[in-house]
Image (spheres, helix red, strand yellow):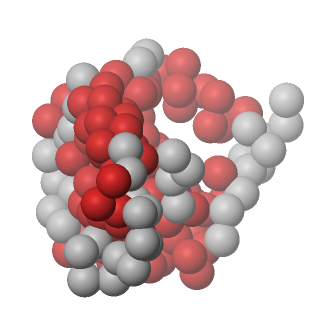
């Protein structure tokens, strides 16, 4: 399964915020990861709408985690942001027009694989993805999106 760029950016944003205290601008996050600020703005809106981040406008504002990183489950986040219900056409009875569906084993195999994939992601939180906050911050600060010289 391939995650959308939207979900990739969302997970990276949550990891960034988990590694740092306080509010951080979308511009700063986009710069650190060298990703599109405009796309990240849409991601941030969706993260806020789903209760993963708090968004504060104005000077000193920005994004911060709405809950502790160890309470943000990776599987839940991916389920929220990805349309896994229509992984393949035959998963959706309203749009499925495959003639072999009644005798095909593909649906069951793919559904089982998707369940296993999501079950694996359910074992992890954003805190697990960050690991050592200090090392993660250091890697961000020395990365290609930083203004610091190496």
Work out whether 89 lies above or below 38: above
Query: Is 33 placed left or right of 133 in the picture?
Result: right
**For the view shown, which residue lies furthest in the right direction?**
150
Work out whether 5 lies above or below 93: above
In which quarter of the view is residue 140 placed? top right
In which quarter of the view is residue 115 placed? top left
Question: What residue is rendered at 64% in x and 51% in y?
Answer: 32
Question: What residue is rendered at 21% in x and 47% in y?
Answer: 76
Residue in the foreground of this view, choosing between 28 and 81: 81
In which quarter of the view is residue 42 placed? bottom left
Work out whether 15 lies above or below 13: above
| Residue 119 on image: x %, y % | 25, 30
| Residue 144 on image: x %, y % | 79, 44
Query: Is 69 placed left or right of 84 in the picture?
Result: left
- Residue 98 appears in the picture as rendered: yes
Tell me how many marks there are.
0
Question: What residue is rendered at 53% in x and 31% in y?
Answer: 137
- Residue 25 appears in the picture as rendered: no
Question: What residue is rendered at 30% in x and 43% in y?
Answer: 108
Query: Is 23 placed left or right of 149 in the picture?
Result: left
Q: Quadrant of the C terminus?
A: top right
| Residue 142 on image: x %, y % | 73, 33
């Amino acid at each position: 399964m391939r995650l959308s760029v939207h979900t990739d950016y969302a997970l990276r944003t949550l990891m960034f915020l988990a590694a740092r205290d306080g509010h951080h601008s979308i511009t700063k996050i986009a710069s650190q990861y060298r990703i599109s600020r405009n796309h990240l703005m849409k991601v941030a809106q969706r993260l806020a709408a789903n209760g993963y981040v708090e968004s504060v406008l104005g000077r000193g504002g920005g994004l911060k985690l709405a809950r502790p990183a160890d309470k943000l489950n990776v599987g839940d986040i991916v389920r929220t942001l990805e349309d896994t219900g229509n992984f393949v056409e035959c998963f959706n009875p309203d749009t499925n027009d495959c003639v072999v569906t009644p005798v095909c084993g593909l649906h069951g195999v793919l559904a089982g694989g998707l369940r296993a994939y999501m079950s694996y992601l359910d074992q992890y939180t954003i805190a697990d993805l960050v690991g050592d906050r200090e090392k993660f911050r250091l890697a961000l600060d020395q990365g290609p999106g930083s203004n610091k010289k190496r």
